[in-house]
Amino acid sequence: MCTYCGCQSITVINILTKQHEKIINKLGQLRRAAQIFDVPGTQNHTSELADLLAPHTVLEEEGLFAALVADNEFVEPVAKLTQDHIEIDELVRRLLEGDISLADELDTRLRDHISNEENGIFPAAAVSLDGAVWDQIQEELDRAMGLPAS
């Protein structure tokens, strides 16, 4: 995980990065279960991964990505990351249905996606978005988590 640019000092990016760590850890468990052909174990880990991905994707797409697309410079990279989410969700769906042969593909795709966010869009967002936008994203996050307005 990235630690060199300081973007993790922004609360939203810090939260997303911590979620990435949990996602990667669960992904490792999923992959190890698939390697020993443990279909029920793979499906269980995939279900838990899906539970981690769902709120994470909402925070990215409805929070950070939505703020970034206001700047035309970010339309294309955000579209690519959003398409990744769709393709990752499809791999997860197929794994849940029992096609554990997709575990390595999911591992590669998800790790590449996270790397693109942490080494690309997160640092870019840190320098491109101003404090008011970060405050708005944080307020939306707090509402989504059921926290009182600050």
Image: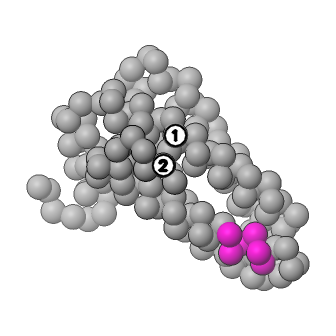
**Numbered disc 2: secondary structure:** loop
Tell me what residue is drawn at x 88 percent, y 64 percent.
Answer: 101
Question: In the displayed structure, does residue 41 sit left or right of residue 66?
Answer: right
Q: Residues within 10 Å of mark 1 (few under 14, many from 20)?
A: some
CB within 8 Å, label 2 to label 1 = yes
Predominant secondary structure, magenta span: helix
Q: Amino acid at mark 2?
A: Cys
Q: Is residue 76 above or below residue 148?
A: above
- Residue highlighted by disc 1: 119
Q: Which residues are magenta?
A: 28-33
Residue 43's disc is none
Q: Vertical placement of 71 versus 149: above or below?
A: above
Viewer-side residue, 5 vs 36: 5
Residue 72 visible at all: yes
Q: Residue furthest front?
A: 4
Task: Indicate the amino acid at tag 1.
Answer: Asn
Write down the residue under mark 2.
2
Nearest to the observer: residue 38 or residue 142: 38
Image quadrant where residue 76 sits: top right
x, y percent for residue 121: 48, 35
* Figure label count: 2
Q: Residue furthest top?
A: 72
Q: Residue furthest left?
A: 150
Q: Residue at x 83, y 82 (%)?
A: 38
For the C terminus, give its image quadrant.
bottom left
Residue 58: in sight, yes or no? Answer: no
Residue 124 appears at what percent x and percent y? 42, 31
Q: Residue at x 43, y 61 (%)?
A: 18
